[in-house]
Amino acid sequence: MQFYRKIDWLSVGLLTIILGLTAVFSIKFIYSFLGFDESVFVWTGFNILNGEIPYRDFLEIKPPGIFFVNALGLLLFGVNNFKLMPFLIFIPSLIGLYICLVRLGVFKLLAAILTLHYMTIVLYLPFHHTLNDVETYGLAFAVLAMVSIFLNLNNGVQLKNDFSKYLAGIFLGFSVMCKEPFVLTVIAIMGVVFVYELTIKRKQALTHLFLTIAGGITVVVVFLSYLIVNNAADAYFGTLVSEFVHSKMHSSQPATLSYAWSKLSANYYNLKVLSALVPFYIFFIFRHKLGAFSLTTIAGVILGALSITIGRNYWDHNYLMGTASLLLPAIFGGKYLSQIYFKFSKRTKILTVIVFLLFMVWPTVMLGYNFLVDVYARSYPKPVIYPDPVLSQAVQKYSTANDYILLKDNPITYVVWNRKHSNKWSTMLDSLLKLYEGESTGEKLSILRSDIETKLPKIIYLPESQIRLEQNFHMTQVLYPIINKYNYQQLHPNFYVLMNNAPRD
């Protein structure tokens, strides 16, 4: 009975509501279609589980975090249920955010509203169609960092060597490893917390900052050591250069501040998306006015906006990179309201509650309507990832798990067939030739062909696809010449098998 009475039933109830809504709104992501990018991420995780080293054994223009998270997802849930992996990180960040806000001194109802806002942004379908992407993981790790860094931030706690700050640095490092622009969010979080500790005259402020930085450095050192030991460091740094080239290739947006702001204000920095945070911002400004702390926090919001606009691509899922920065002033606004609420008159208390509820209406309706429309439009079938069973039988008959095969399109088939890849890239696109090793186009294709012949594929599968017209150089100068040289036998349309390794004279 004493244990029963000690349970914080209000928090249990609020978290139950939050997690219940999360479960409902998550259905569309668990059963979402399998996009090409997600197929690539799963393929990279599959390669790691097969002992391959990123950037050395396979190439993809992404930071390493997404590779290792998908490897863990495949290991835990298998190829049929890997879409559960994002929730393994997102759900703890959701629960942790509520708990750390309450420990920070934010009223439980206000903490629940801020947590619901975080949930809304992550599960808002127009921002992305899958949770298994770099932005979702980067944001979840950033929020876990905020959870760790805020956990012992209340005035009554005086810890010099606070391990939670070091853990926060580790999560911040993970966030950047998922997508590099999160480094601006990292700076925002560390800067705001450091200045806040200075404003409340914390003697340990500098120590806590160093602990957080040390945690982030630990992640970087461990990863670089992993690359160096496995002779993959040069390839990784070469990929960093390729990321800038790749971003420029895809960016057709003007590099102006006004255009960046128009995109942000139209898609993210507007009342439709951020209305639940507006009352929190009002109390934040009322409390901190234009001081060092408020200016630091506003700078953090601006850094969040910059992280979204880096590369000038403005893809919808990029907007998640600004969420953690936008939460910072709202958190301290909620903390201040929680400190002064008891001083309000009864009428002011009622009015405050009404205002917060009114500002919650639009995001709640937005997410609910978005979900209902999606339910009406879909029957939520499991995503189809299995290729033609006739081809699968042929693969099993003419190759083993130790054999190399070659696919020109969607790499998920490597995973389903459990076969090795003879091409380092996940797919073949003529536009990616700019990123290949070599100087001229001819030299690049020659190197590619030589690499494929080194791991001569037992099977080559060249299905018709929407991108076939974008693969002309690869088809005519690499794939067809290899098929002819080594006398591959065509068993099915676009399906070739190597019967022996002897090249034609």
Image (cartoon, grey):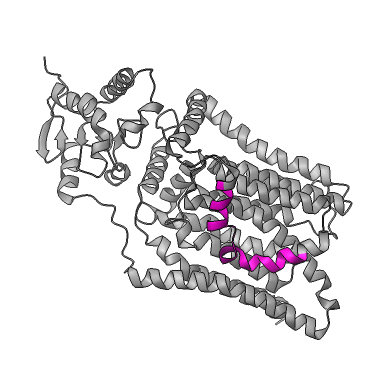
Left or right: 274 as drawn, with respect to 432:
right
Circle count: 0
Left or right: 122 as drawn, with respect to 158:
left
Residue at position x 74%, y 52% in the image: 297
| Magenta-colored stretch includes residue 133 | no
Classify residue 489 by image quadrant. Answer: top left
Position of 252 relative to 145 (above/below):
above
User: What kind of secondary structure does the magenta stretch mostly adopt?
Assistant: helix
The magenta segment is: 259-283
Residue 83 at what x, y percent from top left?
41, 56
Name the residue nearer the viewer: 371 or 227. 371
Position of 46 relative to 79 (above/below):
above
Left or right: 125 as drawn, with respect to 95:
left
Q: Is residue 403 visible?
A: no
What quarter of the picture does the N terminus occupy?
bottom right
Position of 115 relative to 198 (above/below):
below
Classify residue 376 by image quadrant. Answer: bottom left
Q: Is residue 309 visible?
A: yes
Residue at position x 32%, y 20% in the image: 447
